[in-house]
Image (tube, helix red, strand yellow):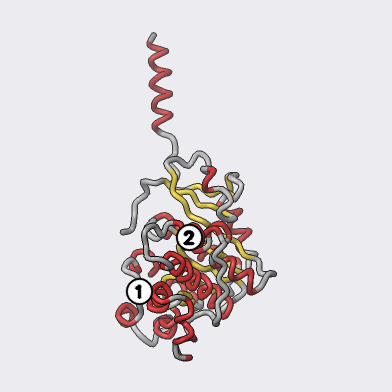
Amino acid sequence: MRFIVFILLLLATSTLAQDKPAYKIYTKDGKAATYDRMIKEISKADVVLFGELHDNSIGHWLELQVAKDIYTVQPDLALGFEMFEADDQIVLNEYLNGTIEERHLLNEAKVWDNYKNDYKPLIEFAKEKKLPAIASNIPRRYANLVYRKGIESLQTLPEEAKQWIAPLPMDIDLTLPGYKGMMSMGGHQPSGSSENMAKSQATKDATMAYFILKNKRTITLHFNGAYHSQNFEGINWYLKKADSKLKIVTIHSVEQDTLDKLDDANKNTADYIICIPKDMTKTY
């Protein structure tokens, strides 16, 4: 009897002592992959789109590790950021080259509220290694203009303003599932606004793709919200449209209750899917 009790206690202890992984990487078909395998493949790409969950602490830590490890293989690396708007490029450059101090960057660029926790480590890495950091996003005032007045409103901007967006006219395919899904979630919005919402999203994707290509190095590692590159759409679609020969690798971040296997809904969303526990600490 004592032996049976001992075995049961041993099994219970063993179960409780199992590793609690902070993340697990899968290929698009749901097969487990190692971090080293992912780095080996993405180091051969022209562009890597890292789709993040903006408030996920493990995702942000992994972004820095991926940047560091690609750099050891290919130092001709550029980092790109949805989190900086294109008209902030001069301020960002001035900080990277030491012309201005961090307080000027924080005051004069439209940095996100979670900059210090989540993106500062990447910017400081770029500064240390003298890497380009691309402010790739459309200025939000112009994306909002499209939402309020339609895509044609961009044509009314002065030429000086147009330099901060993808060249006009932008090709927008609202039949892409991502944009169709966005329009279907429009609910009870006024007529036409759900379409403008999708077009506003497309102007972000098109502009990020444009500035990635305009500032391309041997490898460009671009950080963006997961929805901007999931299912090989968004930025990926615009990059491929501009240059079908580009080797693009996409990374997509998801949260699940368990990491034992990749949920079917998360398969085929990217070349590599980083699966993170739902209860992982949030950065804001």
- Residue 252 lies, in percent from the top left, at 51, 56
- Which residue is more in the foreground, 46 or 121? 46
Tell me if 195 is positioned left or right of 101 in this view: right
The C terminus: image quadrant? bottom left
Residue 107 makes an appearance in the image: yes
Residue located farthest toward the front when viewing the structure as drawn: 191
Q: Would you call the spot at circle 1 few (<14 residues within 10 Å), some (14-19), or many (20 or more)?
A: some
- Which residue: 32% across, 77% down? 106
Select label 2 or label 1 by which is in front: 2
x, y percent for residue 221: 54, 68
Figure label count: 2
- Classify residue 39 by image quadrant: bottom right
What's under tag 1, amino acid-wise?
A: Val
Could one spot residue 72 in this view of the protein?
no
Residue at the spot 45% in from the left edge and 80% down from the top edge: 86
Mark-to-mark CA distance, 2 and 1 = 20 Å
Q: Give the SS element for disc 2.
A: helix
Q: Mark 1 or mark 2, which is nearer the start of the sequence?
A: 1
Instruction: Name the image quarter holding the N terminus.
Output: top left
Q: Position of residue 225 (x, y in %)?
A: 45, 63
Q: Residue furthest bottom?
A: 159
Q: Mark 1 points at which residue?
A: 111
Q: Mark 2 points at which residue?
A: 227
**Residue type for callout 2:** Tyr
Residue placed most toward the observer, 150 or 215:
150
Quarter of the rendering containing residue 43: bottom right
Quick check: 37 left or right of 98? right
Q: What element carries label 1?
A: loop
